[in-house]
Amino acid sequence: MTLQRRLEGTIRDVPDFPTPGILFKDITPVLADPVLLADVIDAMAAPYAGRGITHVVGVESRGFLFGVPVALALGVPFAPARKPSKLPWRTQREAYALEYRKDVLEMHVDALGTPGQVAARVLVIDDVLATGGTAMATCRLVERLGGEVAAVAVVVELGFLNGRAALAGREVHAVVGF
Ligand SMILES: O=P(O)(O)OC[C@H]1O[C@H](OP(=O)(O)OP(=O)(O)O)[C@H](O)[C@@H]1O
Ligand SMILES: Nc1ncnc2[nH]cnc12
C-alpha cells in the first residue's frame, strides 16, 4: 500500500474542532504508529538530502514533532518558531492568521546564525498546510533573520484552502493531500 493510502487510513477526521465548521485532521494516530511515523519522516527528509539544507525550522507545536526527526535525518540544526513569549532570548516576531485563529510566531534573532552573517538555507516543517498563514509567517521570519527558504514540507496539505498559493512561489512538499 502507498504511504499516501496508509496516511489516509490513519489520520482521523474530527468535525467541528476547534470551532464549528472546521474538519480537523488529527495526526496523533500517525505518532502512535512507529513504522508509519518513520516512513513519514523519511518521505519528508529524503527529497532534501544533498540540497544544501543548513537548518530545519519547525513550527510550534505539531511542527516540532516532525521537524526534530527531519533535522536529525538530514544531520542539520533544528530551530523552533514558537508561540509568543515562550522564547527566552531576543526575538523577531510575526503576526498571522490561520484557518481558525489569529496568533504570533517568534524566533530567536540568532536561531540561524549571528545576525548580519547568516548564510542559512532552511527547510520549514509543519504537520498541516491549510490556509498557509502559519507557513508564510514562518517563511517571513526566516527571511527577516537573513535566511533563505529552500522549501516548506508538511505531512498534510488541505488543497481546497489554497495554502500553496499563499506561499507565493516557494517550494511546497506534502506527503499527502486532501
Ligand atoms: O495553514 P494554516 O491555516 O496556517 O494552518 C496550519 C497550522 O495550524 C496548526 O497550528 P496550531 O497553531 O493550530 O496548532 P498546534 O499548536 O497544535 O500545532 C497546524 O499545526 C499548522 O501550524
Ligand atoms: N483542518 C485542520 N486540521 C488540523 N490542523 C489544522 N491546522 C489548520 N487547519 C487544520
Image (spheres, grey):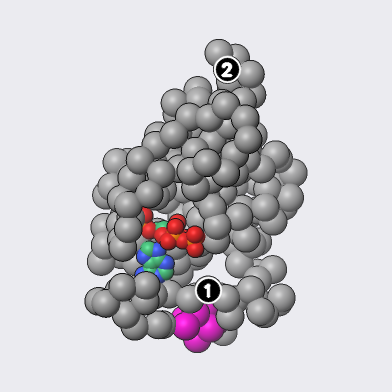
Q: Position of residue 114 (x, y in %)?
A: 63, 18
Residue lying farthest to the top in this orientation: 116
Q: Position of residue 158 (x, y in %)?
A: 34, 66
Residue shown at 71% from the left, 76% from the top: 34
Q: Which residues are magenta?
A: 6-12
Horizontal side of residue 69 vs 62, given as left or right? right
Residue 86 in sight from this viewpoint: yes
**In which image quadrant can residue 64 be found?**
bottom right
Identify the secondary structure beneath mark 1: loop
**Nearer the N terminus, badge 1 or badge 2?**
1
User: What amino acid is labelled 2 in the image?
Assistant: Pro
User: What amino acid is labelled 1 in the image?
Assistant: Ile
In the image, residue 169 sits, relative to residue 22, either above or below, namely above
Q: Quadrant of ligand 1?
A: bottom left
Identify the secondary structure beneath mark 2: loop
In the image, residue 90 sits, relative to residue 129, either above or below, namely above
Horizontal side of residue 49 vs 59, given as left or right? right
In the image, residue 164 sits, relative to residue 36, either above or below, namely above
Query: Between 51 and 64, which is closer to the camera in this rendering?
Result: 64
**In which image quadrant can residue 108 be found?**
top right
Give me the C-alpha separation between circle 1 and circle 2.
Answer: 35 Å
Residue 171 in sight from this viewpoint: no
Q: Position of residue 15 (x, y in %)?
A: 34, 83
The stretch drawn in magenta includes residue 9: yes
- Give the position of the C terminus as an image quadrant: bottom left
Q: Is mark 1 within 8 Å of ligand 2?
A: yes
